[in-house]
Image (spheres, helix red, strand yellow):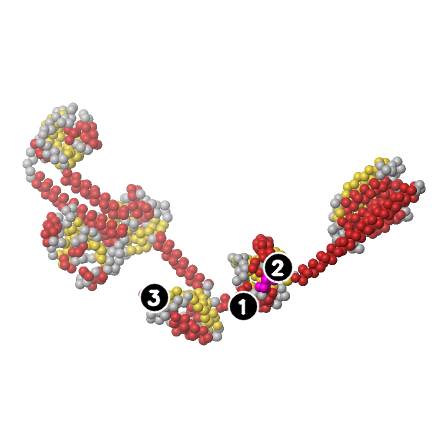
Amino acid sequence: MSSNTEQKRLVELQSFNIVNEETEDTLTGLTELASTICNTPVALINLLDSHQQITKSSNGIDISAIPKEESFCQYAIKNQDLMIVEDTLLDLRFRNSPYIEQGIRFYAGVPLTTEKGYNLGTICVIDNKPRQLTDQQIQSLKLLAREVVDHLELRKKNTQLDARNKRLNNADKFLSNSSDLQIIVDTDSLRILKTTENTHTTLDYEGSLIGQPFADQIIDGPAKRNAIKFLRQSNKKKGTFIAPVETGGEQIIYLEFTFSRFFGRWFVTGKDISEQEKTLRALQETQIKKETILNSASDCIITINQHGEIMQFNSAAEKTFQYDKEEIIGKSMSETLIPPLYREEHAEGIKHYLETGHSPIINKLVEMPALRKDGSQFPIELQVNHIKDSTPPQFLCIFRDISERRETQEKLKKTLTNLNLGQELAEVGSWRWEIGDNTMEWSKKIYDIYDFDIMQKPSVDLLLDRVHPEDNNRVKDLLSSIMEGDLIKDFEHRILAPNGTIKWVRHSIKTIYGPGDKPLEANGAVQDITKQKKTQFKLEREKQLSDKIINSLPISFFMFDRDGNPIRWNDQIREITGYTQQEISYMHPKKFIAEEHRQYVEKALKKVFEKGEVTAEANLKTRDGDNIPHLFSTSSFRSGDRNFFIGTAQNIADLKEYEHQLEISLKEKKVLLSEIHHRVKNNLAIISGLLQLECFNTENDNTKNILANSQLRIQSMATVHEMLYQAQDFSNLSFSDFVSKTIDSIKSIYQQEHSDINFEVSVNDIQLNVNQAIPCGLIINEIVTHAYNNAFPDDKGTITIFLKENGDEVTLHIKDDGKGLPDDFSLSHDNSISFSLINTLVQQLEAEIEVRSEAGSEFVIHFEKKNVKGAGSSLTT
């Protein structure tokens, strides 16, 4: 700063006439607010003259003046913006400052710049520890600097205004009301009739105002309309208002007009109050800035009087406490914001301070609950400060909602608790090794794992003392590798406890490196894995046993995951395929299958995961290219998040050869059976033809009947023979087909003689064993033949055949509507061939038979469906 500029700055400082004046309450409040917002113990407002720094207001320290060359502010006023020294020990400008030795480690100052651009001094905050300011704190400190300058400017203008008023009071009072101008206005036209010379002087008009509308001199639209409205009211006699007027020099001045009506005229006097209006506006702007500073703070800032009534309530307080400022101003802070349990203590604390100047809650930071409008409570941090020199006494209360902090603390506490609990449950301890000075620290769990005395100090040597002798050298080598910068992530070793117990532990390590990749410290977690190791050893023994078992199997064993990666296999696979262990470990299962069967096997593998198990035949391809038929039995299972399939492969080459020989033998038997069938069929046909020929040649009816019956029996036997030849399974013959063919045979023989005899047949699709089907069919043949021959003398009638199955019980019901049986008929005593045969067949079936002769003859046979063993029941074609 040049000497000329400095001289002008000092002249500007003198013009404010404040250097030797006493400290004002407003400045005191601003330093307290600066200290609170920036959270520093000290805040000052300093002015710098030619040789010293003069403190006009201080908070947190009692100081009046110091030499200019020792001050921090001498550097701050050289800037046009904020000067921050976060750590004075690191700033060469202050290395010889005596105040660093007194504990000043942080300084932030904003120049007090006047309207003319001169820096009179600073508003600054000071702390005894290095720190930083937030952007919000920096902005607030700048606003406070502007507030100080506005206050000084306003004070200066008020002083000048007072001096001018004194001069005016001594001026010539040529007008009775001592106004600067006087105008007479016509009450009808509202035009100017007369003015004084001072009017032209004040308004800087060269021309005449006579005849001009009075309201035209007012430039504010609403003020002009209000003036016209007022002047036109005939009932008004007096009035006063303020309006802006433009002078001839195009300047805006504010005049306070006083109106008086006399003799049909308005006598108007005007007083130039531009300076007062400017001062008032400056005060309003100052208040707005003050409100802006308060409302920009994130903390709740509330001022109360000595009665505890709220005087100021910033935006943060509105948001936090849920009150609008208008509804809470003037109310008791204790009754609205303090919970009932703390109200008496709060009131007594302020009362005691007012009486003694001391209080445990004033100028102290305390934590307590606060009360919202809805009645809910929340934790706060409260500091109540007495605003110095305030009359009557006022207090600045700063509330800070610490709900999030409390919640974070609780979460942290819970996290630490869970961490400790987790370490306990997981048998995990933690340690930290300072590699440079070879010191260690560890958690309580390590004392438990290593069986250390809780009073023993952690060290590397103490740790090594517990390592099993067989593992000691290996662990030492690992620690040496860590010290040399090698990356060691984890290792395991045994512990030998004082009582001889052996434990297994695993260390997981994270090494922190410094410049040049030099290891600085290692952090680790140690876990007792004794149980896991025992399980591991047990599994290894079980695997060895299972390997012996599967390798002793006479068939191949395999296990793959779903992606086809080999998991386990036995020696049989290696021996039969010729592949080595290493080759098998990389082979997909389809590589073991012959090319012509691979697509079929791939589909089978998909099915095994859908259905759970699959059996398939395919050729196994050896390393030499040979194809060996195998039967594969495979099933799938899931372990964890992986799917596997396991199975066996049986060499069926010999079985395939045996099947081939069986097929050849079966074909030969089929040819032989077909030849026998044709010979038997032809022989039966010849016998039936001979019987029919004899029947045609004989005249004896009895002989004809015997021959016809014999022919039917032969045809029935032929039908059974045909049915047996065509059957696929002798244990389940379709009996309904046999019944139909039997009836057709009977019709063909007796068709001409008994053309009016009808059949009603209802036979369920019943499957019978061959040893039940044959006797049952022959019974039907004999009973129906008997009905044809004996039941219908007039050759007309109906034969009903009904066969049904109910569970394992079969019922055969044959009825005719002919002449019926003789009254003395008895099945057991009838010696005819038909009934003797029927009786024998019923016994063979182990059946029960009922014979009735009411409106014809009726035979009801019941027998149990059985898998009766005999000559043909177990045969299949």
Check if residue 620 falls in the magenta segment: yes
Check if residue 72 falls in the magenta segment: no
Residue depth check, mark 3 versus mark 1: number of the one nearer the observer = 3
Residue 209: x %, y % from top left: 11, 29
Q: Which residues are magenta?
A: 619-628
Residue 52 visible here: yes
Figure quadrant of residue 318: top left
- The residue drawn where x is 46% and y is 71% is 494
Residue 18: x %, y % from top left: 13, 50
- The residue drawn where x is 34% and y is 47% is 372
**Which comes before the other along the chain, label 2 or label 3?**
3
What number is the disc on residue 517? 3
Name which residue type carries label 2: Asn
Q: Which residue is mark 2?
A: 619
SS label for mark 1: helix
- The residue drawn where x is 15% and y is 27% is 213
- Give the answer, above or below, for where 495 lies relative to 139: below
Residue 206: x %, y % from top left: 9, 31
